[in-house]
Image (cartoon, grey):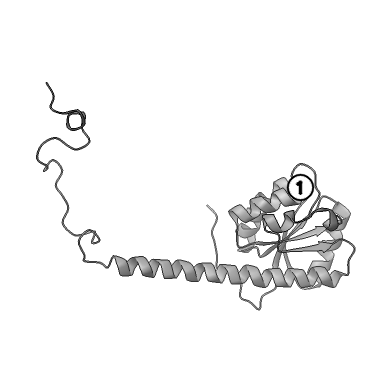
Amino acid sequence: MTEWTAPPAVDQPPRVLLVDDHIGLLAQLTELLTESGIDLVGTATDGHQVLSAITAAIAGHGWVDVVVMDARMPTVNGLAATRQVKAVFPAIEVVLHTAFADQLGTEPQDVGVFAQIAKGSHPNHLLNAIHQACASARRHRRDGRANAVAEVRRVMAAYPPGEAGADPGGPRPRVGSHHGPHPQTPASRMGAAT
């Protein structure tokens, strides 16, 4: 089982997974991100590798903030892979890095893409999108933890220890202490047995 650690502090660099089927571009992006101080936690060359790459990155680095993903790849394209990422890891943001942004319509937003950056645009556009996506991902995780804590407090307030039915050490019905047939027995559903 994977150990889940707390997400990095806001002042820590974004933790990014790169996904692109063009090995040369993947190498250029790797160089750009590492030289820019971004923590590159892994790479993948196809959309079908994304979930296992995220899981491996989490196991090795503790967290993933952003996936930078190519839109068009063999086997599983970037939009289908984004849908999978958002279903399993909703707090991870996806930046779509594509040469086909004008041909995609609204589908990227529909599947949960945080931003689209055109391939060949100035590198600062991609870096800015990564930093904004990272801030969003960390805000989602922080809010998610706050919501989970609030829900636990709400349940605890509704069922304080010591109230009937809530105290695990409280009175329990004895097995076999009921009178007459058990409500789930065939005799009780069909009338008296002959």
Q: Is residue 14 something one can see in this rendering?
A: no
Hey, what amino acid is under mark 1?
A: Asn
Residue at 15 percent across and 56 percent down: it is: 171
173 or 36, which is in the foreground? 173
15 or 179, which is in the foreground? 179
Q: Secondary structure at mark 1?
A: loop
Residue at 22 percent across and 36 percent down: it is: 184
Q: Judge from the rendering whether residue 3 lies leftward or rightward of residue 93; answer left or right.
A: left
Residue under pointer 1: 77
Residue 98 found in image quarter: bottom right
Q: Is residue 193 something one can see in this rendering?
A: yes
Q: Position of residue 93 (x, y in %)?
A: 67, 63
26 or 134, which is in the foreground? 134
Residue at 57 percent across and 67 percent down: it is: 141
Q: Position of residue 109 (x, y in %)?
A: 71, 59
Q: Position of residue 146 (x, y in %)?
A: 49, 71
Which residue occupies the extreme left position in the image? 179
Q: Position of residue 72 (x, y in %)?
A: 81, 49
Quarter occupied by the C terminus? top left
The answer to whether residue 11 is above or below residue 112 is below
